[in-house]
Image (spheres, rainbow, N blue to C red):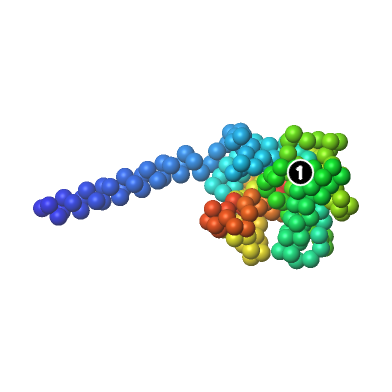
Amino acid sequence: MKAVADTILLKNDIAMLSLLRTAALAVFSVVAMPVTAENNIYNGYQIPNFTVSVADGPFELRRYDSHIVAELEVEGSRGSAIRQGFRGLAGYIFGKNSGSEKISMTAPVTQTATGDAWRVQFMMPRSHDVADLPRPNNDQISIRETEPETQAVIGFSGLWSDQKLRKKTQELKAWVASKGLKTVGDPRYYFYNDPFTLPWKRRNEVAFLIE
């Protein structure tokens, strides 16, 4: 009798856990109300200001404010371009500029295909505007202010291999289509962590500009 009772209790516990899981998914899987990026900070680094109008599992629809970026176009494979672009932009913020001024690091590092090249970007801290930023010593680096934009984004952890980026891009395209939305241009890759961060602790994103 005790074994039968224990079996019934176990089945009841499993059923309750399943019910709680279903309820949690119903509450948290889809959100359709504006949410502001918490303090616009990630691991102590400023990130662009945005609000979230739709959150659906790993997918979000975001409205980004305008912000200032330093950017550099680099030819080559995606992997070599992100490394070369990062080094060039890091040199700029670490003092290779007209004022030998150090500028705070921000997140994420952004990479976007531009024809046969790649555009790599750092956001500039919100305390700066275009006029007061020092001129880069590297004349291939440009400084500009972006326009406010709506973007669809998918987040994921782990390593950002070309294969994984392609997979997440296809998943994001399918989600955008399911919402009746249209993308503009090539995907944007957002990398939030340094190479020494453990893969499962990394924050990566693929994004598309939305019409």
Q: How many marks?
A: 1
Q: Amino acid at mark 1?
A: Lys
Q: Is residue 108 visible?
A: yes
Side of 96 where 32 appears, left or right: left
Side of 154 where 70 appears, left or right: right
Q: Position of residue 185 (x, y in %)?
A: 77, 52
Specify the quadrant that holds the C terminus. Answer: top right
Q: Position of residue 49 (x, y in %)?
A: 68, 37
Provide the secondary structure element on which disc 1 rests: loop
Identify the residue at the far front of this view. Answer: 100
Side of 58 where 14 appears, left or right: left
Observer-nearest of 156 and 95: 95
Q: Is residue 211 visible?
A: no
Residue 61 position by quadrant? top right
Q: Residue at x 62, y 58 (%)?
A: 195
Q: Residue at x 79, y 47 (%)?
A: 95
Q: Which residue in the structure is indicated by mark 1?
A: 102
**In the displayed structure, would residue 48 be above or below residue 77?**
above
Residue 210 position by quadrant? top right
Observer-nearest of 95 and 177: 95
Side of 17 where 47 appears, left or right: right
**In the displayed structure, would residue 113 be above or below residue 52?**
below
Q: Residue at x 81, y 60 (%)?
A: 74
Identify the residue at the far right of this view. Answer: 139
Callout 1: 10 Å neighbours few (<14), some, many (20+)?
Answer: some
**In the displayed structure, would residue 140 be above or below residue 150?**
below
Q: Position of residue 201 (x, y in %)?
A: 54, 53
Identify the residue at the far left of this view. Answer: 1
Q: Residue at x 79, y 43 (%)?
A: 101
